Structure formats: structure tokens, C-alpha cells
């Protein structure tokens, strides 16, 4: 979760509360909705929705800046991210509804997944696995 906090400070997010505050000030974190995630090593994130929203917005931005528009990777990740972001916006105050609709774990796990995707984008941009490599032999195995 520390990665999320560092990432958000680098993109200028100082407050994770949905309540408006004067620019440059920081509000105290909201009281956690739950006491534990029940997952070893995964702490509760008190302000998970704004953090996850910022991560999804950063994912969309990084995809548009680093990955070719027609690549299958970008198309798929954008579709998934936009769908999840829409769910976040529809159910901003209801974490249980977000977790149920997205159906990929607790919101803390969704944050971890979003962080992992952000780390993967530059790797995929350099590898470009969707491009065809001329002169590459593709092994063909026949089983007997």
C-alpha cells in the first residue's frame, strides 16, 4: 500500500478524502470500514476508493502515452480499467458493492492489481509482444 501512497504523491494527490479541502492541505484519513482484510500482509486501506480511482486514471493515461492504440494489450487493459472505473464512480461510497461488481477480490487486492498493471505497462511497451517478428522461427512439434 505504500507504493500507492508514493504514487499518488508523485501525481499531486495530497488528500485521499472525497471531501473538498483547500489546496495543499491534507485531511485525516477516513476511519477504516473494516478492521482487517483477513489476508496476511494486506492491511486495510482507509481511503481505498480515491486511491484506486487515481490508479485507474493513471493506468489509462500511461496506456495512451506508452502503448500503440491498436495493440490488443492496450485495447483489453483499457476496457477492463474503464469498466472498473465506471463501477467505482457508480458505487463510490459502497465498498462492498464495488468488490461484488468487480468480482476480483477485496478493494485492497484491486489496489495491488492496479499497481502491478502500472508496473507492467512500460515492460509491455518495450517488449511489444503483439508485433510480428519477421525471420522468427516458430517451433512446430508433432506428437507421435
Image (cartoon, rainbow, N blue to C red):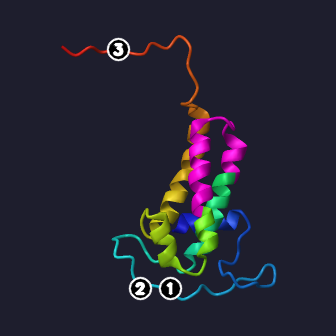
Q: Which one is closest to the eye, mark 2 or mark 3?
A: 3
Looking at the rendering, which quadrant does residue 68 occupy? top right
Q: Are marks 2 and 1 in contact (CB under 8 Å)?
A: yes
Q: Which SS does the magenta portion mostly show?
A: helix
Locate residue 142 relative to residue 127 in the image: left or right: left
SS at mark 1 in the image: loop
State the image coordinates of residue 122 (x, y, percent, origin top left): 61, 43
Earlier in the chain: of badge 1 and badge 3, it is: 1
Q: Is residue 41 something that shows in the picture?
A: yes
**Image coordinates for residue 120, horizontal then vertical, percent:** 54, 46
Q: Please name the residue that numbered disc 3 is placed on.
A: 140
- Residue range in magenta is 61-84
The residue located at (56%, 30%) in the rendering is 130
Q: How many C-alpha atoms fall within 10 Å of the one at disc 3: few (<14), some, or many (≥20)? A: few
Residue 79, numbered circle? none
Label of residue 35 in the image: 2
Amino acid at each position: 500500500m505504500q507504493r500507492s501512497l508514493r504514487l499518488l504523491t508523485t501525481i499531486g494527490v495530497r488528500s485521499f478524502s472525497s471531501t473538498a479541502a483547500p489546496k495543499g492541505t491534507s485531511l485525516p484519513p477516513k476511519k477504516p470500514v473494516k478492521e482487517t482484510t483477513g489476508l496476511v500482509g494486506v492491511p486495510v486501506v482507509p481511503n481505498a476508493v480515491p486511491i484506486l480511482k487515481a490508479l485507474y486514471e493513471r493506468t489509462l493515461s500511461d496506456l495512451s502515452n506508452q502503448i500503440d492504440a491498436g495493440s490488443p494489450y492496450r485495447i483489453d487493459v483499457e476496457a477492463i480499467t474503464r469498466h472498473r472505473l465506471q463501477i467505482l464512480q457508480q458505487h463510490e461510497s459502497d465498498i462492498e458493492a464495488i468488490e461484488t461488481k468487480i468480482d476480483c477480490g477485496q478493494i485492497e487486492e484491486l489496489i495491488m492489481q492496479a499497481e502491478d498493471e502500472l508496473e507492467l505497462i512500460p515492460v509491455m511497451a518495450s517488449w511489444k509482444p503483439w508485433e510480428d517478428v519477421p525471420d522468427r522461427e516458430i517451433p512446430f512439434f508433432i506428437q507421435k
